[in-house]
Image (spheres, rainbow, N blue to C red):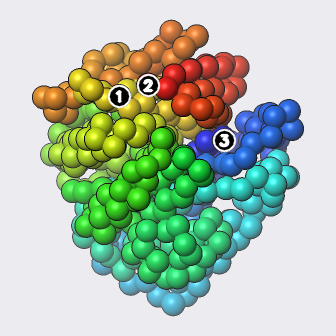
């Protein structure tokens, strides 16, 4: 299998041509020609909808309004039509790129969305923004087109494998023999105070129980289970009125102050399930525009976290990554009975792969082999079965 995430950028005109933009896609296609993949797992931000704020006149005009007027603005029928046209045209352009289309047309894909497939930071804004007419209108258009272009389905009539056929959330779970692949939806019910709502939590636990006789479960968590936390910055932003740039990136993270208790509950749920049912769990994530390897462990159980992104999005600056390396050296202690930590990537000697990358996963018997294919750097990890 191949895992990939973050197939775009917030900024425009970053690349001079399609081959430069899609260099990692071309590398993936070359690896597929050499040793064919059975499945592509897409972990979020397949589409970057950020251009909507600049390319659609109605929304560009809305962005120029004072923020108090923006929050109370109406979502007109003309805006609804413009939003639907934008998402439709964007997906058509995205999937038809000559560097992507050949491999997408021959290897099956399973996809889960993240914020940029909707709008940047979706779910991490204050409630009055999320419930505003503008945000709800864009949510409806994004949801319809995500279902159409990434799930090949109607958003209110999802096929077998989805944990809620009516589409209140898009979580799904599939089995390939003794391998389970499970993707909770971390955006549909998200608010600033929670990641998953009651529907999502029930679906996750029910899917785990249906996979209790698997030998290995791959969990797609669009946001990494193991990452650094910057609680000091979160507290600072919390004292400043309005929504600050980068604030949503902090609140998006599982170890955020806003989600710490829910994150702790999730990790404890996964560790307990793995220990009691004897099922190995490996988590796959994207979102952070870096490669990384983390471990969640109790006295009896270990869950590995493999993060890979972006296949297109450039990595953060060297200075930002140096800060993350320093902060990431400290283990996290979400509970007295278990911990989470980032580990140096094999062959690199550092915790983060600062390069565009995608992840190759090979399951052989009870063993898992993972290879981060980064531009100019590769890291190979072997996780033996226990």
Q: Quadrant of the N terminus?
A: top right
Sequence-wise first label, 2 or 1: 1
Q: Is residue 299 at least partly visible in the picture?
A: yes
Tell me the distance, in whole angstroms, between the alpha carbons under discs 3 and 1: 22 Å
Name the foreground residue: 148 vs 128: 148
Decide if residue 273 is on the left or right side of residue 31: left
Sequence-wise first label, 3 or 1: 3
Q: Residue furthest left?
A: 336
Residue 1 - label: 3
Q: Nearer the viewer, mark 2 or mark 1?
A: 2
Residue 323 spot, x, y in % from top left: 38, 20
Q: Is residue 9 at least partly visible in the picture?
A: no
Residue 164 spot, x, y in % from top left: 42, 73
Q: Which residue is mark 1?
A: 302
**x 35%, y 72%: residue:** 70
**x 85%, y 52%: residue:** 102
């Amino acid at each position: 299998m191949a895992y990939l995430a973050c197939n775009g950028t917030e900024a425009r005109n970053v690349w001079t041509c399609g081959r430069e933009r899609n260099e990692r896609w071309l590398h993936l296609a070359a690896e597929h020609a050499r040793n064919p993949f059975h499945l592509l797992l897409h972990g979020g931000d397949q589409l970057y909808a950020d251009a909507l704020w600049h390319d659609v006149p109605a929304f560009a005009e809305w962005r120029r309004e004072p923020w108090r007027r923006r929050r109370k603005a109406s979502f007109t029928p003309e805006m609804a039509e413009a939003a639907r046209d934008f998402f439709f045209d964007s997906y058509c352009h995205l999937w038809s790129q000559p560097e992507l289309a050949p491999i997408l047309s021959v290897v099956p894909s399973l996809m889960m969305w993240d914020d940029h497939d909707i709008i940047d930071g979706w779910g991490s804004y204050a409630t009055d923004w999320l419930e505003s007419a503008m945000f709800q209108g864009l949510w409806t258009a994004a949801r319809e087109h995500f279902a159409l272009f990434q799930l090949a389905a109607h958003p209110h009539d999802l096929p077998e494998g989805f944990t809620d056929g009516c589409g209140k959330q898009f979580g799904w779970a599939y089995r390939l023999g003794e391998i389970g692949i499970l993707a909770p939806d971390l955006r549909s019910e998200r608010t600033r105070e929670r990641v998953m709502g009651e529907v999502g939590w029930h679906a996750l636990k029910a899917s785990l129980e249906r996979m209790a006789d698997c030998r290995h479960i791959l969990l797609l968590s669009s946001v990494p289970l193991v990452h650094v936390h910057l609680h000091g910055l979160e507290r600072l932003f919390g004292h400043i009125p309005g929504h600050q740039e980068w604030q949503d990136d902090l609140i998006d993270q599982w170890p955020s102050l806003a989600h710490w208790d829910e994150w702790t509950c999730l990790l404890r749920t996964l560790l307990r399930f793995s220990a009691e049912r004897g099922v190995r769990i490996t988590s796959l994530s994207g979102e952070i525009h870096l490669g990384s390897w983390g471990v969640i462990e109790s006295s009896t159980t270990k869950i590995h976290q493999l993060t890979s992104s972006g296949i297109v999005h450039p990595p953060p600056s060297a200075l930002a990554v140096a800060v993350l390396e320093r902060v990431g050296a400290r283990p996290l202690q979400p509970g007295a009975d278990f911990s989470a930590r980032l580990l140096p990537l094999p062959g690199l000697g550092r915790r983060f792969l600062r390069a565009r990358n995608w992840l190759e996963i090979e399951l052989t018997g009870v063993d898992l082999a993972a290879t981060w294919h980064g531009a100019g750097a590769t890291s190979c990890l072997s996780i033996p079965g226990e």
